[in-house]
Amino acid sequence: MNGLIVYLSGEIHTDWRATIEDGCRAAGLDITFTAPVTDHDASDDCGVTILGAEDRAFWHDHKSAKLNAIRTRTLIEQADVVVVRFGDKYKQWNAAFDAGYAAALGTPLIVQHDPALTHPLKEVDAAALAVADTPAQVVGILRYVMTGSLG
């Protein structure tokens, strides 16, 4: 199988992306990874930095959300596979949107979260082709998809 483009969406407070990228590189997989902007300040302020200041917080956030949506939607549309991770500490509403968007496009979706989140994420999990507990399991899924090998 030729190389894949894998979009890594979701939680930004742990190193799960690096764990997946390192694991896939160690397995010799030809994967290009893309992701949202994970710098909180850049993501939160891109709209007003590029398009000008706003007096109200709603419009400040609205501008940034729209610019981030351009990036996110474009990268999801280009992806062969979308991986969405839900962390334990924060509500990742954007990740839920990304999962739904990928599923609506018919892009294969892998969801990764702690088993304790299974009930609150049951609808998101239902849209996924695979639900993993750990980044290592995501690496195993990607290895299997690309090579047909279990290890």
Image: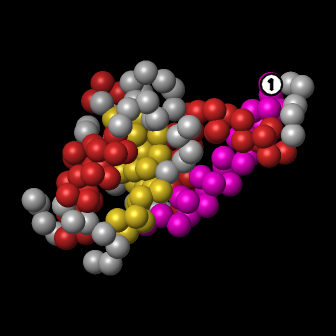
Rendering coords of residue 150 (x, y %): 11, 60
Name the quadrant of the C terminus. Answer: bottom left
> Which quadrant would residue 60 be assigned to in this image?
top right
Indicate whether 4 appears above or below 65: below
Please identify the residue farthest to the bottom as the structure is shown.
2
Question: Going 80% across and 46% down the picture, which residue do you hit?
Answer: 50
Q: What element carries label 1?
A: helix
Say which residue label 1 marks: 57
Residue closer to the observer: 7 or 28: 28
Residue, x 20% and y 54% (percent of image)? 140
Q: Is residue 59 magenta?
A: yes
For residue 28, say whether it is visible. Answer: yes
Q: Is residue 127 left or right of residue 47?
A: left
The answer to whether residue 113 is left or right of residue 27 is right
What residue do we see at 21% from left, 66% from top? 28
> Mark 1 belongs to which amino acid?
Ala
